[in-house]
Image (tube, helix red, strand yellow):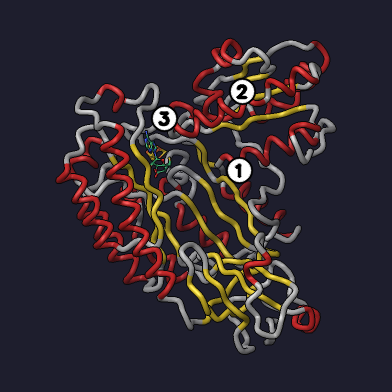
Amino acid sequence: MNVYDSRRIINGLQSIGYKESQSAEKADLVIVNTCSVREKAEQKAFSFLGRLASLKKKNPNLIIGVGGCVAQQEGKAILKRVPFVDIVFGTHAIGRLPQQIAEIEKNRCRIVDAKLSDTIEPIQPSGISESKSPVTGFVTIMRGCNNFCTYCIVPYVRGREVSRPPDEILSEIKAYVSSGMREVTLLGQNVNSYGTKEDLCSFSELLSMVNEIDNLSRIRFTTSHPKDISEALIHSFQSLDKLCHHIHLPVQSGSTRILKKMNRNYTRDHYLKIVEKLRLSCPDIAITSDMIVGFPGETETDFNNTLDLVKTVQFDGLFAFAYSDRPKTPAVKFSDKISEPEKKERLQRLLNLQERYTKEKNEALLGKVEPVLVEGLSKKQSETNLDENGTDSSWTGRTSTNKIVNFSLNEKDIAGSGIVPGKTIDIKIIRALAHSLRGKPAEHKESSHDIKGEKNYAA
Ligand code: SAH
Ligand code: SF4
């Protein structure tokens, strides 16, 4: 979500003449886009801001802005706490940022714009919102959240749920595809309730429409709330050829008692049923999740239920967090807080357990041939030169199940087959590492995964 917002901020600033700078030292304007979902993220934002003080001293004309959830949450308190900040803008103020910056340039004033609107205002389409490369990108389909999980700050800093009309979403994706994007990730705090309030279409209907977009190869989405997952969505993994075989389905706890205190509105058993149905519909589906340990009142038995759920489901990956109090949330007032050392210890036990499954899931792919969407050159090229014939390029992409694969191609192969980022090629998995895979191009065969009219790689 923040990456997408950063892209919208950049687009807005470009419209008033700013260009991206490679370093804060050389910039005339620095925007810190913050997240306050977890305490650590908020601390990081303030410590980064602290480091900007020396830049402002050197260049008093430098404009410094703070956006995102922390800006929304703290508002003008940031101007007091960090005296060299020029503008604080909330999560609904991104569209107004260019005019506010122009105002600061003219009058050297300090601005706070942290209004949250409850009305259904259209979300401004952003420019290309690329993540790692233009091959893959994000498109937000809704913003805000109405669920009020008792630990979560999102509804307070991002406001009520608002969905964008399907035609607006489809036009944005089509525009990105025509400039080279091949994979889109649809974003929302709970995509499963897309369109409900506005009586638009259902999320699975939206997916079907996105699936029809020519020259788009892959569709992903995040995040899915288990309480709202529909049979139609589960079936989409079978019926939509572009929908990737991966779902991020945050469970948060393996204890029904704790889930109730979290206001998650599903039980452990219900979650396990969904997992079963997903695997029936799509046997190779990768399932990842979020987990909070040390929620107020979590007993050793509750925590063991969490460990047990992880053993039962065997997630492909897990983001695990120690519970932290967030301002305004009901859980702040809950009794029986878990001590920091206890939370840390539980977190470590959970991470150790999950590591085993992540590794096993990666190892299960050894020797298999996977269609991989080529995203570009890999960052650590030197580590990935695996080809016994000697290679001068190391490439990266992901499987449909969202696993990173690094692989090598030699210049002749690339020239012969015209491999460029954006093509889907068949890669044989030859090594499984903790968090990525290594592969090599498989024997040539026509891949049904590529977009029509494009040739596949011939090894
Ligand atoms: N909308 C998504 C999650 C958004 S927040 C969902 O419903 O799943 C991302 C993750 O941060 C959450 O899934 C949760 O695991 C974690 N998180 C949120 N608030 C937290 C808190 N107070 N302490 C620790 N982790 C938290
Ligand atoms: Fe937060 Fe719950 Fe909404 Fe997710 S569904 S954003 S965890 S309140």
Find the distance from the CA under tag 3 to the CA under tag 1. Answer: 18 Å
Q: In the figure, residue 81 lies in which quadrant?
A: top right
Going by the image, does 172 lie left or right of 287? right
Residue 2 in the image: above or below residue 314:
above
The residue labelled by disc 2 is: 50
| 10 Å crowding of disc 3: few (<14), some (14-19), many (20+) | many
Find the distance from the CA under tag 1 to the CA under tag 2. Answer: 22 Å
Residue 189 in the image: above or below residue 158:
below
Residue 216 in the image: above or below residue 450:
above
Find the distance from the CA under tag 3 to the CA under tag 2. Answer: 24 Å
Going by the image, does 415 lie left or right of 262? right
Q: In the structure shown, which secondary structural element does the residue marked by tag 3 occupy?
A: loop
Q: In the structure shown, which secondary structural element does the residue marked by tag 1 occupy?
A: helix
Amino acid tagged 2? Gly
Towards the viewer: 205 or 426:
426
Q: Residue 409 appears at what percent x and percent y?
A: 70, 78
Foreground mark, 3 or 2? 2
Residue 305 in the image: above or below residue 389:
above
Among numbered discs 3 and 1, the one appearing first in the sequence: 1
Q: Quadrant of the C terminus?
A: bottom right
Amino acid tagged 1? Val
Amino acid tagged 3? Ile
Foreground mark, 1 or 2? 2
The residue labelled by disc 1 is: 3
Q: In the figure, residue 217 lies in which quadrant?
A: bottom right
The residue labelled by disc 3 is: 153
Q: Is residue 214 visible?
A: no
Q: Is ligand 1 within 8 Å of the beta carbon of the residue shown at mark 3?
A: yes
Q: Measuring 67% from the left and 38% from the top, which residue is drawn there?
A: 8
Q: Residue 14 appears at what percent x and percent y?
A: 79, 36
